[in-house]
Amino acid sequence: MTEKSPSRIEEAISRVVELESELEASGDVTTEAAALARAKEILHAWVDSVTAVVATPGVGRAVLIHENGTESRIASPDLPSRLAVPVTFAKREG
């Protein structure tokens, strides 16, 4: 994974906050170390509750199915491709 420069991170934050404001929703930006560590801890617990994943690279979407039956849909240009099983054209034995 490539490391992003602070200016690219700030640009991404500004873009997301601006898009959220267009939807008349406020965003909460977290870049401070302790707040970011807390957010990562919450995200790890959330990911650990996943019992199934549907990756659809063609539309840039991953759907996480959680143990309580809820769905979380993630639109991403690269996550679904990372989750999808690579295609192989080699013949299988047996």
Image (cartoon, grey):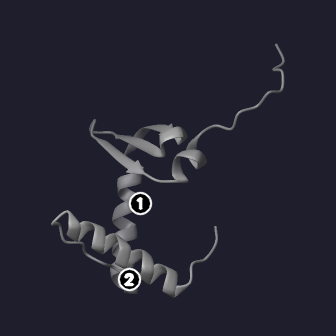
Does the residue at mark 1 contact the one at mark 2 (Cβ under 8 Å)? no
Residue 15: x and y, percent? Answer: 37, 73
Q: Looking at the rendering, which quadrant does residue 37 occupy?
A: bottom left
Residue 39: x and y, percent? Answer: 34, 70
Most extreme residue toward the front, as rendered? 22
Q: What residue sits right under mark 1 in the picture? A: 44
State the SS at label 1.
helix
User: Which quarter of the rendered picture does the N terminus lie within?
Assistant: bottom right
Which sits in the foreground, 9 or 21? Answer: 21
Vertical position of residue 18 compared to residue 82: above or below: below
Query: Crowding near pointer 2: few (<14 within 10 Å), some, many (20+)?
Result: few
User: Which quarter of the rendered picture does the C terminus lie within?
Assistant: top right
> What's the residue at 33%, 79% (across, down)?
30
> What's the residue at 55%, 53% (across, down)?
78
Q: Earlier in the sequence, mark 1 or mark 2?
A: 2
> What's the residue at 38%, 83% (across, down)?
31
Residue 32: x and y, percent? Answer: 37, 86
Q: Nearer the viewer, mark 1 or mark 2?
A: 2
Which sits in the foreground, 48 or 82? Answer: 82
Vertical position of residue 68 compared to residue 42: above or below: above
Kind of residue at disc 1? His
Vertical position of residue 28 compared to residue 74: above or below: below
Q: What residue sits right under mark 2 in the picture? A: 31
Kind of residue at disc 2? Thr
Query: Crowding near pointer 1: few (<14 within 10 Å), some, many (20+)?
Result: few
Which sits in the foreground, 77 or 72? Answer: 77
Most extreme residue toward the left, as rendered? 24
